[in-house]
């Protein structure tokens, strides 16, 4: 029987392996060699010189994942969330992307914002975070 060890590691230690192995199967998976663009992002919205909200996540291979969007309590109802989402959609297009997606609790008030901005619920994630139901939203920015 093989004795395989599973050990903690770091991206620095495994980058070369990952790059070589993915490159080797690009032709099989995609029919060509590809560049899998990956960018972590974090932006803030300022109102009257104060941080009114933040948005952060990851752009990966043409899609932007919104990990978190937070509007300060005193700034809610002043379109901060709308401006952050519109900004990230434009930023996604500048990156060469085609879609923005996110996951949020099915009962949170932000759902109305995403629907107003044209996002579609494409899945319900049953018993997801903390065993609560969450919704997957997507918006295609290009045809």
Image: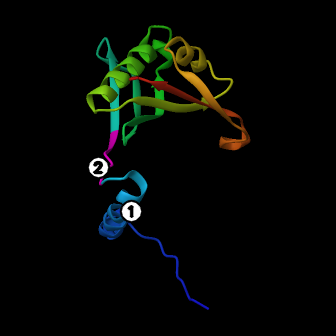
Q: Quadrant of residue 129?
A: top right
- Image quadrant for the N terminus? bottom right
Residue 20 in percent (x, y) is at 31, 67
- Image quadrant for the C terminus? top left
- Residue at image position (33%, 49%) is 36
Asked whether 104 falls inside the magenta stretch, the response is no
Q: Looking at the picture, does residue 137 appear above or below residue 25?
A: above
Residue 123 in percent (x, y) is at 64, 32
Q: Give the secondary structure at mark 1.
A: helix
- Residue at image position (34%, 32%) is 97
- Classed neighbour count for the residue bearing mark 2: other residues with Cα under 10 Å, few (<14), some (14–19), many (≥20): few
Pick out the residue farthest to the front. 31
Asked whether 35 falls inside the magenta stretch, the response is yes
Main SS of the magenta segment?
loop
Mark 1 vs mark 2, foreground winner is 1
- Residue at image position (45%, 25%) is 140
Q: Give the secondary structure at mark 2.
A: loop
Residue 37 in percent (x, y) is at 31, 45
Q: Mark 1 = which residue?
A: 25
Q: Mark 2 = which residue?
A: 35
Q: Looking at the picture, does residue 123 appear above or below residue 20?
A: above
Using residue 1 as the reference point, say whether residue 9 is left or right of it.
Answer: left
């Amino acid at each position: 029987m093989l004795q395989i060890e599973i050990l903690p590691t770091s991206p620095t230690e495994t980058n070369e392996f990952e790059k070589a192995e993915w490159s080797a199967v690009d032709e099989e998976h995609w029919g060509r060699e590809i560049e899998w663009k990956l960018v972590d992002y974090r932006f803030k919205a300022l109102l009257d010189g104060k941080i009114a909200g933040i948005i952060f996540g990851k752009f990966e291979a043409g899609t932007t994942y919104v990990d978190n969007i937070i509007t300060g309590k005193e700034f809610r109802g002043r379109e901060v969330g709308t401006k952050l989402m519109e900004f990230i959609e434009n930023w996604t297009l500048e990156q060469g992307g085609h879609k923005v997606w996110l996951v949020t609790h099915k009962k949170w008030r932000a759902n109305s914002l995403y629907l107003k901005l044209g996002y579609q619920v494409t899945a319900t994630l049953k018993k997801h975070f903390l065993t609560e139901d969450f919704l997957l939203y997507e918006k295609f920015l290009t045809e």
